[in-house]
């Protein structure tokens, strides 16, 4: 009982700052018109929903979101879906745009973003701890447990750490720790990372999650006069000799054997992480009532499946091994192993397989689509084939090395020549 009370008191004094300013260039063209944390995920969510849901589930009620790059859709999503706090009780979630309050530069990195907004940290007396979060990772984590660890160690800074095989260490900033989990060194994406004591094949990768004592954070950033760019390669090394810095081994709330934390920073990673959701037993569990993932959901009607002409050449509106969002109409088309965001329409005789369709996509009749990511409001012309002739697709769209076809938002697609689709149309319609 005492532990619950202590954790509750502590979390009330924590200020969360969520970093959402990166361009996410490796996710182009999905980030051409939006910030990476605003990229749709899993049909109804945005990437930022996972960090914000973790925050709410952990008891955090004071949250600043530091925006910078093409943040219109992110601002709208947060305003519509996350206005759930009560200012009269000292709760808030506020979007803070880059303002060039200090100097003439936009945010140069995570530490610089906080430095340019130190007035938010210093304002008032309620804040004793500051937690820095990234808004574009998929995972479940109770930040209150990390705060308890921070307090137990009497730390000035605690870094969220993920156990990763040493062979994958070059993808992370690596925390070197002693037997007490105190950080004694930092390696930026090393070829030969230092393993965790007692675990020869495992190293500690930084998750980009940091808890600071407020005074220590302000002191370090003020003393640097803006020379700190990133928390990993700049702040951690400076604090090692003068402050108590610890690594917190990530505790997964996903209730699976393996730890789940995904940086969907590339199109391939984004596609694979989404496709896991339609498997029979997904690694990432969206259906856990004990750890709900919140989002904004517009007032859409239920999904509808129409036409059941199961003879050869007939229309059959069906979806198998798929996630279908509200407002979708599967009108005589077939959907397999795919994710459909709200208000998608798949018309008669079309087949969509192993694909992710964003809000408002309209698939015309007699189309064949596979291994594709189709952004919002794209209208696929009748008879179009996507994912079957990659050389042809490359002339029109973005195609990754692994063969994923990506069609950007509002793309205008010319219909294929009549000879490309007319014979199949005539044959199918005669039988129908």
Image: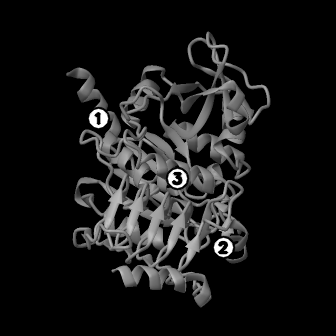
Q: Nearer the viewer, residue 171 or 219?
A: 171
Ranked by sequence position, the earlier of labels 2 and 1 is 1
* 372 and 35: which is toward the camera: 372
Picture coordinates of residue 13, whole percent (x, y):
36, 41
Horizontal and vertical percent for residue 278?
40, 49
Q: Nearer the viewer, residue 291 or 236?
A: 291
Number of numbered markers: 3
Q: Considering only vertical position in the picture, is 98 above or below 138? A: below
For the residues labelled 2 and 1, the Cα–Cα distance comes to: 53 Å
Mark 3–mark 1 distance (CA, rounded to whole Å)? 28 Å
- Which quadrant of the figure contains the C terminus? bottom left
- Single out the mark in the foreground, 2 or 1: 2
Q: Residue at x 25, y 27 (%)?
A: 4
Kindly tell me whether residue 144 is visible in this rendering: yes
Residue 126 visible in this rendered orientation of the protein: no
- Callout 3–callout 1 Cβ contact below 8 Å: no
Examine the rendered structure and indicate whether residue 192 appears above or below residue 328.
above
Q: Earlier in the sequence, mark 3 or mark 1?
A: 1
At x 55%, y 54%, the residue is 271
Q: Which residue is mark 2?
A: 397
Q: Secondary structure at mark 2?
A: loop
150 vs 270, nearest the viewer: 270
Circle 1 is placed at which residue position? 9
Give the Cα separation between the discs numbered 2 and 3. Answer: 25 Å
* Number of residues whose C-alpha sits closer than 10 Å to that of mark 3, classed few (under 14), some (14–19) or many (20 or more): many
For marks 2 and 3 on the same chain, the one whose residue lies earlier in the sequence: 3
Q: Which residue is mark 3?
A: 136
State which quadrant residue 181 falls in.
top right
Q: Position of residue 190 (x, y in %)?
A: 77, 32
């Amino acid at each position: 009982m005492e532990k619950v009370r202590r954790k509750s008191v502590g979390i009330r004094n924590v200020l969360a700052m969520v970093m959402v300013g990166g361009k996410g260039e490796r996710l182009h063209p999905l980030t051409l018109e939006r910030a990476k944390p605003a990229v749709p995920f899993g049909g109804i969510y945005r990437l930022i929903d996972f960090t914000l849901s973790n925050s709410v589930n952990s008891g955090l009620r004071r949250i600043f979101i530091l925006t910078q790059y093409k943040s219109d859709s992110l601002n709208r999503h947060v305003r519509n879906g996350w206005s759930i706090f009560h200012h009269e009780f000292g709760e808030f979630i506020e979007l803070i745009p880059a303002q060039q309050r200090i100097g003439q530069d936009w945010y140069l990195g995570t530490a610089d973003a906080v430095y340019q907004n130190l007035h938010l940290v210093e304002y008032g007396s309620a804040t004793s701890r500051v937690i820095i979060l990234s808004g574009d990772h998929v995972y479940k984590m109770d930040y209150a447990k990390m705060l308890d660890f921070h307090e137990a160690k009497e730390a000035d800074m605690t870094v969220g750490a993920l156990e990763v095989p040493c062979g994958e260490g070059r993808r992370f900033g690596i925390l070197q720790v002693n037997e007490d989990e105190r950080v004694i060194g930092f390696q930026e994406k090393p070829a030969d990372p230092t393993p965790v004591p007692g675990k020869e094949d495992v190293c500690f990768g930084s998750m980009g999650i940091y808890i600071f004592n407020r005074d220590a954070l302000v002191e370090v950033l003020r003393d640097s006069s803006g020379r700190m760019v990133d928390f990993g390669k700049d702040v951690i090394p400076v604090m090692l000799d003068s402050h108590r810095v610890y690594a917190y081994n990530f505790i997964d709330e996903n209730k699976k054997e393996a730890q789940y934390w995904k940086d969907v920073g590339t199109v391939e990673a984004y596609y694979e992480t989404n496709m896991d959701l339609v498997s029979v037993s997904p690694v990432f569990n969206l259906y856990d009532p004990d750890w709900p993932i919140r989002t904004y959901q517009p007032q859409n009607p239920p999904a509808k499946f129409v036409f059941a002409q199961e003879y050869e050449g007939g229309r059959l509106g069906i979806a198998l091994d798929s996630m279908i969002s509200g407002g979708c109409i599967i009108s005589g088309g077939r959907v397999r192993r795919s994710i459909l965001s709200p208000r998608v329409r798949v018309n008669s005789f079309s087949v969509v397989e192993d694909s992710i369709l964003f809000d408002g996509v309209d698939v015309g009749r007699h189309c064949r689509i596979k291994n594709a990511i189709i952004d919002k409001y794209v209208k696929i012309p009748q008879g179009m084939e996507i994912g079957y002739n990659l050389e042809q697709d490359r002339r029109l769209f973005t195609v990754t090395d692994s063969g994923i076809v990506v069609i950007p938002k509002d793309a205008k697609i010319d219909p294929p020549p009549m000879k490309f689709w007319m014979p199949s149309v005539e044959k199918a319609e005669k039988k129908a």
